[in-house]
Image (cartoon, grey):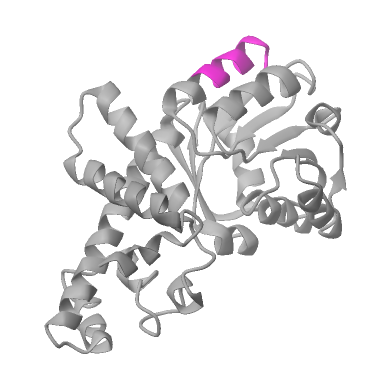
Amino acid sequence: MKIAFIGLGNMGGGMAANLVKAGHEVHAFDLSPDALTRAAENGCATYTSAREAVQGAEAVVSMLPNGKIVESVYTHDVIGQAPASALLLDCSTIDVDTARKVAQAAETAGYAMVDAPVSGGIAAANGGTLTFMVGGSDAAFARAEPILSAMGKAVIHAGASGAGQAAKICNNMILGATMIATCEAFALAEKLGLDLQTFYDISSKASGQSWSMTSYCPVPGVGPASPADNGYQGGFAAALMLKDLNLAIEAAASAGAKVPMGTRAGQLYEEFAAAGNGATDFSGIIKTL
């Protein structure tokens, strides 16, 4: 299949490479020359504009920084430029309202579109083990599933347009809050004289167990390898966690939902990022405790 891929950053670059490995013809675009060079090395054909990349595409996949850019790219460079038969898949994490607005514009122009944000981070993007949360019609999901499966281990239909984004921001609100609680517990355990490996061995098999502990432990040398073992580099940047928490807080305000834990997690990550730690893995917030 001829697939245009727009946005080749830390996540998109690995995702595009996995589409090539799956046998697809990938036409790639990014504003970064370095990203285009890496994409070419991974077997993608590269282009100097998104409009050029989508010409003749059977599907368009995007991984972009925010909703404003997603809306601009689809409005000006994809809709009306890619064939109307092309399936559009936006894998960015953006606000629900913008996702629905862009999907409506695409559908009005005759395109099928899904929002398909991801969970898993850079390692999963490179390894093809992402989880996709997909919003869109049943028919659009059926078309999207085999494409997304080439980049992930799980592809789940969350509901209508925007439902993928809703699932993603709710999931990451849990992740942000539980990571802080996990960091607090390890810091407290140390101050109380507990050996941290021993505490991990206990809590990972008890009611305190969570993904933040057993799959992404914030303590170096404890549990499976994680960014903590690499100076809190790589993984999921604190600035991106803050972005997702802010999206969840904004969505909660719009829906009239109370999210005190999510709100406090957002405040703590805002302080962490403002102190120069935006590029640090979000588990590095343990250093503030």
Is 106 colored magenta in this rendering? Answer: yes
Residue 110 vs residue 218: left or right? right
Determine the residue positioned at 67% across, 13% down. Answer: 110
Looking at the picture, how far across and down is residue 57, in whole percent?
81, 32
Q: Quadrant of residue 282?
A: bottom left
Stretch in magenta = 101-111
Q: Looking at the image, which residue sits at the far top?
A: 108
Residue 212 vertical placement versus 254 (above, below): below
Placement of the N terminus among the 4 image quadrants: top right
Query: Residue 188 versus residue 21: which sits nearer the camera?
Result: 188
Looking at the picture, how far across and down is residue 24, in whole percent?
80, 48
Residue 61 vertical placement versus 136 (above, below): below
Residue 1 seen by the camera? no
Determine the residue positioned at 39% across, 70% down. Answer: 215
Q: Quadrant of residue 73?
A: top right
Q: Looking at the image, which residue sits at the far left?
A: 192
Looking at the picture, how far across and down is residue 167, in whole percent?
38, 39
Q: Main secondary structure of the magenta part?
A: helix
Looking at the picture, how far across and down is residue 115, in whole percent?
53, 33
Is 121 colored magenta in this rendering? Answer: no
Determine the residue positioned at 56% across, 21% down. Answer: 103
Query: Residue 212 versus residue 35: which sits nearer the camera?
Result: 35
Placement of the C terminus among the 4 image quadrants: bottom left
Residue 183 vertical placement versus 106 (above, below): below
Residue 80 seen by the camera? yes
Residue 144 vs residue 194: left or right? right
Determine the residue positioned at 66% across, 29% down. Answer: 88
Query: Residue 8 versus residue 141: which sits nearer the camera?
Result: 8
Residue 283 vs residue 55: left or right? left
Q: Quadrant of residue 18?
A: bottom right
